[in-house]
Image (cartoon, rainbow, N blue to C red):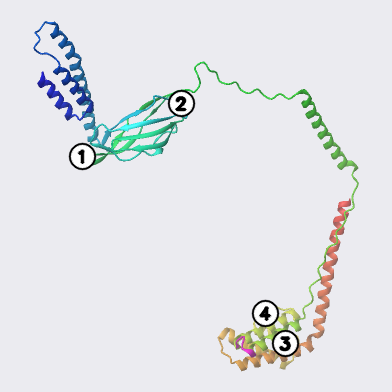
């Protein structure tokens, strides 16, 4: 008998179970108190049999349980998974209630590596805090469900000391029952009744609605039949003075004088001064003689001037200025500073000749300009009068 008990005790140690080890220790202590020298059939032997029978049954049951757990652990490790233990501090929870979920290992050779992420829990649970040791993980959870539920689907990374590798630890499902905060005989609170208007207040509301409707009808009739036409008071408009007439000769003379002063002090180069001189003359011809000299070639501009009876000497001076400008612009011709000053002075001589020739034409252009301004002002004043007549009708 002692050999059987010792063999079972050794087997339980191999299974690494603290509960079985404690049970075999209790069995050994009990057997030491039995007197095996009692004769069979006596009262002492019967007592000894009754004492040994439940002890032997407990040993067998513990051994079978540990064998199953050990074999399940081996199979899980072979598949890359290790089962864990899980238990909750409460089997029934109210909405908003706190409870702890304790997850432990089945062997001292297993280590829990990390805490599960809060996203692994369903919307009925919220992770509030966690405490982790090598063999025990304690999670404080808050329950927000309204019916019985199962806490499952958790996996934790664990480390096996024996195999020196990391595995996935499966947490068994934990059943939680919903506990209502109402007592068994409590009823739900009734719905709040609809608001009933007092009779006097309802009458005031009806009278106000009728008065508003009558006021709207009266205003419509007043606008439609009884309103007299009102004379609109025209606010005086601030009329800005028309722009002054720009004399083309003054513009030409001002530009040529500016070019001459700038080239004398070295603000502009000789090439730029010649090209600006030619453009100033072209702008004058376009404004006075009403043809697009700035868009024409030098030959076309000179032909237009010849058609307007320009004398030969004046045409030769203008042709000299245009030729210098064209050579600089198109042929990259290099001109000296003295030659550029001479070109500008020639243009000033041409300008004075044009003043004597075109003074009458410029006066006609000025009269035509102011006449157009006057016509546009009369048209703008007649438009408000027409709109006022239309409103009055």
Relative to 134, does residue 310 appear above or below in the rendering? below
> Is 268 contained in the magenta span?
yes
Is residue 194 toward the left or the right of residue 142 in the image?
right
Q: Position of residue 11 (x, y in %)?
A: 15, 26
The residue pinned by badge 4 equals 294
Earlier along the polypeptide chain: callout 3 or callout 1? 1
**Do the residues bearing badges 3 and 4 touch, measured as CB atoms within 8 Å?**
no
Earlier along the polypeptide chain: callout 2 or callout 3? 2
Q: Quadrant of residue 101?
A: top left
In-front residue for pair 132/244:
132
Earlier along the polypeptide chain: callout 4 or callout 2? 2
Is residue 160 toward the left or the right of residue 260 in the image?
left
Relative to 132, does residue 94 appear above or below in the rendering? above
The residue pinned by badge 2 equals 94
- At horizontal 21% and vertical 18% (from top left) the residue drawn is 58
Q: Residues within 10 Å of mark 2 (few under 14, many from 20)?
A: some
The residue pinned by badge 1 equals 163
Q: Which residues are magenta?
A: 264-269
> Is 285 contained in the magenta span?
no
SS for tag 4? helix
In this rendering, the label closer to the viewer, 2 or 3: 2
The residue pinned by badge 3 equals 306
Q: Position of residue 284 (x, y in %)?
A: 72, 82
Earlier along the polypeptide chain: callout 3 or callout 4? 4
Marks 3 and 4, how far apart in space? 17 Å
């Amino acid at each position: 008998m002692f050999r059987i008990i010792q063999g079972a005790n050794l087997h339980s140690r191999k299974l690494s179970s603290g509960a079985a080890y404690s049970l075999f220790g209790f069995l050994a202590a009990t057997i030491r108190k039995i007197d095996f020298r009692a004769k069979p059939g006596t009262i002492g032997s019967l007592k000894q049999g009754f004492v040994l029978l439940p002890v032997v049954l407990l040993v067998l049951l513990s051994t079978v349980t540990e064998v199953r757990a050990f074999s399940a652990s081996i199979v899980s490790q072979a598949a890359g998974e290790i089962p864990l233990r899980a238990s909750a501090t409460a089997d029934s929870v109210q909405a908003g209630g706190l409870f702890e979920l304790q997850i432990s290992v089945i062997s001292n050779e297993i280590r829990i590596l990390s805490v599960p992420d809060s996203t692994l829990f369903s919307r009925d649970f919220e992770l509030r805090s966690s405490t982790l040791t090598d063999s025990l993980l304690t999670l404080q959870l808050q329950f927000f469900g309204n019916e019985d539920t199962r806490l499952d689907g958790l996996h934790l990374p664990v480390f096996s000391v024996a195999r020196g590798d990391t595995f996935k630890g499966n947490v068994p499902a934990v059943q939680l029952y919903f506990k209502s905060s109402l007592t068994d005989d409590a009823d739900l609170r009734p719905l709040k009744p609809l608001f009933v208007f007092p009779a006097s207040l309802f009458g005031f509301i009806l009278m106000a609605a009728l008065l508003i409707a009558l006021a709207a009808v009266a205003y419509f009739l007043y606008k439609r039949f009884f309103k007299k036409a009102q004379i609109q008071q025209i606010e005086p408009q601030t009329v800005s003075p028309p722009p002054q007439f720009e004399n083309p000769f003054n513009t030409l003379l001002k530009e040529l004088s500016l070019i001459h002063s700038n080239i004398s002090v070295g603000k502009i180069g000789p090439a730029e001064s010649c090209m600006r001189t030619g453009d100033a003359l072209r702008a004058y011809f376009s404004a006075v003689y009403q043809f697009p000299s700035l868009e024409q070639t030098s030959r076309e501009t000179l032909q237009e001037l010849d058609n307007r009876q320009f004398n030969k000497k004046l045409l030769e001076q203008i042709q000299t200025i245009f030729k210098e400008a064209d050579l600089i612009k198109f042929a990259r011709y290099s001109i000296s500073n003295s030659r550029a000053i001479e070109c500008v002075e020639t243009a000033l001589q041409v300008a004075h000749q044009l003043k004597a020739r075109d003074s009458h034409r410029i006066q006609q252009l000025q009269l035509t300009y102011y006449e157009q301004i006057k016509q546009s002002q009369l048209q703008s004043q007649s438009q408000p009068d027409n709109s006022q007549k239309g409103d009055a009708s």
